[in-house]
Image (tube, helix red, strand yellow):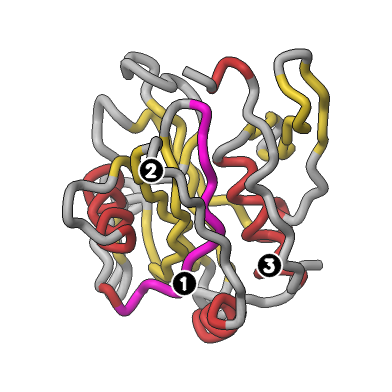
Amino acid sequence: MPPVLTEESVRAVLAGFDRRTADRPDLSAAAVAITLVTTGPDADHVQVLITRRAPKLRTHSGQWALPGGRVDASEAVVAAARRELAEELGLELPESSVLGLLDDYPTRSGFVITPVVLWAGPVSAGTADHPARPGQRALRPRRGEVAAVYGIPLDQLDVEPLFVSIPESDAPVIRLPLMGRFVHAPTGAVLYQFRELALHGRATRVGHLEQPVFAWR
């Protein structure tokens, strides 16, 4: 069983993490949000939000993703992650919700992704069937961009990845088995590092892990 995570415990782990940045001026800056939400009658079950991108998007359509996107000019990465989370899922979080950052991850599609870990606390699906209760925030996925949003419980996130070889690269391709499917890099790599650090206290590096060829564009 994975350990019980709290806002304070994750913040402490990330405060002691010697994160690596990627000095890649040839790539554009981007940020993604690793958003921790709580469910259950006592709001003690922690989940990580993951989305399925809409099928008609111009790039990376239908792929698994974390809320995020390009960092605007003069915008801090933590501000970009919070803005993208609000735009994609309607989840507006204060700056105090930021727990820390993971390693930068350079992508084949031209970005350096900075993962920002946030604590959202109690949330609801934000639907008529599951309206928000007092103290809960409601999710409001953005139509046309987000096909679906899921919460991954920690026991499901605590899985061993698969590493495969491809002829196009000397680096191993990571496949993270989640929800009966494979989640690939960059999302799979970022979630794997979070799992290693938050659940096991291991500063496992993932910047060298490869993406599948379909994600290179």
Give me the residue at 74% from left, 37% from top. 177
Label 3 Cα crowd, 10 Å radius (few <14 / some 14-19 / many 20+)? some
Q: CA distance from mark 2 to mark 1?
A: 23 Å
Q: Which residue is mark 1?
A: 100
In the foreground, 101 or 194:
101
- Image position of 42 with respect to 75: above or below: below
How far is mark 1 from mark 3, CA to CA? 12 Å
Query: Tags 1 and 3 in contact by the CB under 8 Å rule?
Result: no
Marks 1 and 3, the one that precedes in the sequence? 1
Location of residue 65 in the rendering, given as x and y in whole percent from the top left corner: 48, 37
Look at discs 2 and 1 and give the one toward the viewer.
Answer: 2
Which quadrant of the view contains residue 195? bottom right
* Boundaries of the magenta span: 96-108
The picture places residue 88, in percent across and down from the top left corner, at 28, 43
Horizontally, residue 88 falls left or right of residue 26, namely left
Magenta stretch: residue 2 in it?
no
Residue furthest to the left: 74
Q: Residue at x 35, y 52 (%)?
A: 130
Q: Which residue is mark 3?
A: 197
Check disc 1 and give the amino acid type: Gly
- Amino acid type indicated by mark 2: Pro
Where is mark 2, residue-wise? 25
